[in-house]
Amino acid sequence: LLSLGNGRIDPARNYTLLGKERHDVGRVDNGLRSVAYPVRAIRNDSFLYCRNILPHRWPAGNPEYGFKNTDNSPTKSYLTELAPTHPDYKYFEMSFGMRPLEELYDVLNDPDCVKNLADDPAYAHIKQSLWEQLKADLIAQEDPRILGKGEIFDYYPNSKWERNRELYNDPNWNPVKVFEEKFGKH
């Protein structure tokens, strides 16, 4: 999709919304396999606010499955083998660690979004304002996660689910059947 315009297309709108459901291999939750890591976010000229809807889940996949949402590489091997006491462990946390419910970044002063300001009282009004705007827009768009109907995303089968039978050590695992039993054929 390409826009005919460029830059800020609608001068009355100074923000954009982002959403992620990524249905990953190697993330499990409450008996479900290959579940999503849902995030909704709003970004304006100065701030990025992220709402990690299920922060008890691992963003890069579960450790017991080798953080499968990240391809193997020397960097991944290095970080995942570090002890928590190692000086570089902070990079493991940044790459593979759990995320809080809310993240807020000052993109003008922290363009790499490293310093989370969500718990800083000085930014409480900004965080609240961005959350209210995000929530209002998502409700208007009938986002299933915001409306309490987001579990359907966790049941959508991964496109290559058959190869994951070995990962989950279950030759009979069939997420298509699980989805159809819960929601019917689509």
Image (tube, rainbow, N blue to C red):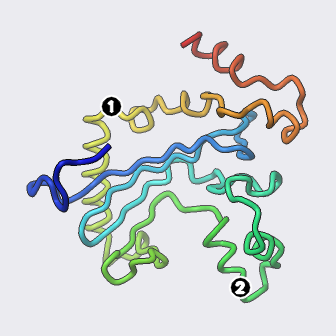
Q: Is residue 103 above or below residue 168?
A: below
Residue 142, which numbered label? 1
Q: Secondary structure at mark 1?
A: loop
Crowd class of label 1 (few under 14; some 14 to 19; many from 20; radius 10 Å)? few
Relative horizontal placement of residue 182, taking residue 172 as reference (left or right): left
Q: Position of residue 182 (x, y in %)?
A: 63, 16
Answer with left or right where residue 113 lies relative to residue 26. Answer: left
Q: Position of residue 42 (x, y in %)?
A: 33, 56
Quarter of the picture containing the N terminus is top left
**Which residue appears at 71% of the width and 46% of the height?**
27
Front position in the image: 131 or 184: 184
Q: Is residue 82 rendered to the left or right of residue 17?
A: right
- Quadrant location of residue 34? top right
- The answer to which image quadrant residue 110 occupies is bottom left
Q: Secondary structure at mark 2?
A: loop
Task: Residue under label 2, please give it.
Answer: 88
Amino acid type indicated by mark 1: Glu
